[in-house]
Image (tube, rainbow, N blue to C red):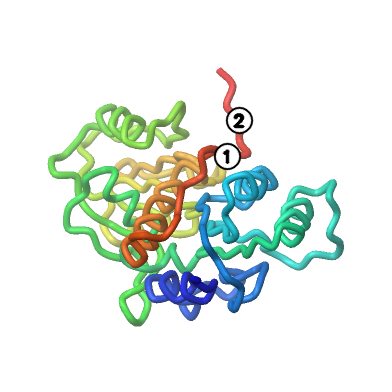
Amino acid sequence: MMKVRDIIKVLEDFAPLSVQESWDNSGLAVGSPDADVSSVLIGLDCTPELVDEAVSCGADMIVTHHPLIFSGLKKISPRDPVGAAVIKAISAGISVYSAHTTADKVVSGVSWAMAARLGLEDVSVLDPEDGGTGLGVIGSFPSPKSADEALRYVKECFSLKVIRSSRPVRGELRRVALCGGSGASLAGKAIAAGADLYITGDVSYHHFFTGDDFMIMDIGHYESEIGIVPVLFSLIKKNFPNFAVRITENINSNPVYYYF
């Protein structure tokens, strides 16, 4: 029988806890490393619905990108989504693990998955740290694109309904910086690295005031990070080819709704 610690080792060989941001809470949030595990369910967010799905499909471990418990809990109530998920997971004996900023900062992680969707070339870390890790990436379109072409291409690659964008530049876009999730704070790094375009999520109003030769696109937090789910799936499946691991059938856990 597989143990939770066996799954954790594979995940942390890929995305070590040592690289996570100081404010983060990646790792095992519910359960024991010594617990048996026969099946793993993978999603972006550990919602009550995801725990229900784990119960229904017989999974006794959940792996997500976003931590179930992100900040301190003062109470655990079934009326709160986090509390409800914690209660359901504990009641069902389901272990819950997250690879959050750990997966943000490693090669082949969140931002690298974004780059792969766009087919970027010559990809490297945008904000490097010791050991070759760091937030964001920068690369190049295979051929330059106009602002309109880039907007259409990004929308298609990420299956977007909408993009929030700064004023389209008149020149061509070639160098592209990316950061999954809330990456507005790296806009200056993108400019310094020579990016013509920066793509991330959760961009605030004032970040959209850009210069004539730089453009920023907000594609959404969820939309920029969902690509890590198949990466985590493939990682476990590659190491344990005969093990029962699946991606949630209710893949869309985006709490943001768009109306047109």
Along the line of sight, the residue nearer the viewer: 129 or 87: 87
Extreme-front residue of the structure: 1
Q: At x 33% / y 63%, what residue is drawn?
A: 126
Q: At x 33% / y 81%, what residue is drawn?
A: 131
Q: Quadrant of residue 144?
A: top left
Extreme-top residue of the structure: 260
Three-letter code for the amino acid on which mark 2 is drawn: Tyr
Tell me the number on the disc at residue 221. Answer: none
Q: At x 40% / y 48%, what residue is drawn?
A: 227
Q: Is residue 33 above or below residue 210?
A: below
Which x, y percent locates residue 98?
A: 55, 63
* Secondary-structure class at tag 1: loop
Q: Is residue 258 above or below residue 32?
A: above
* Secondary-structure class at tag 2: loop
Q: Is residue 241 above or below residue 116?
A: below
Which x, y percent locates residue 139?
A: 23, 54
Q: Is residue 133 left or right of residue 170?
A: right
Badges 2 and 1: C-beta atoms under 8 Å apart? yes
Question: Mark 1, residues whose alpha carbon is within 10 Å: few (<14), some, or many (≥20)?
Answer: few
Which x, y percent locates residue 140?
A: 20, 50
Q: Is residue 157 above or below residue 237?
A: above
Tell me the number on the disc at residue 257. Answer: 2
Q: Which residue is mark 1?
A: 254
Along the line of sight, the residue nearer the viewer: 7 or 74: 7
Q: Is residue 120 left or right of residue 68?
A: left
Assign the C terminus to one quadrant of the image.
top right
Which x, y percent locates residue 48?
A: 70, 47
In space, the residues marked 2 and 1 are separated at their CA atoms by: 8 Å
Q: Is residue 136 left or right of residue 254?
A: left
Q: Quadrant of residue 62?
A: bottom right
Question: Mark 2, residues whose alpha carbon is within 10 Å: few (<14), some, or many (≥20)?
Answer: few
Three-letter code for the amino acid on which mark 1 is drawn: Asn
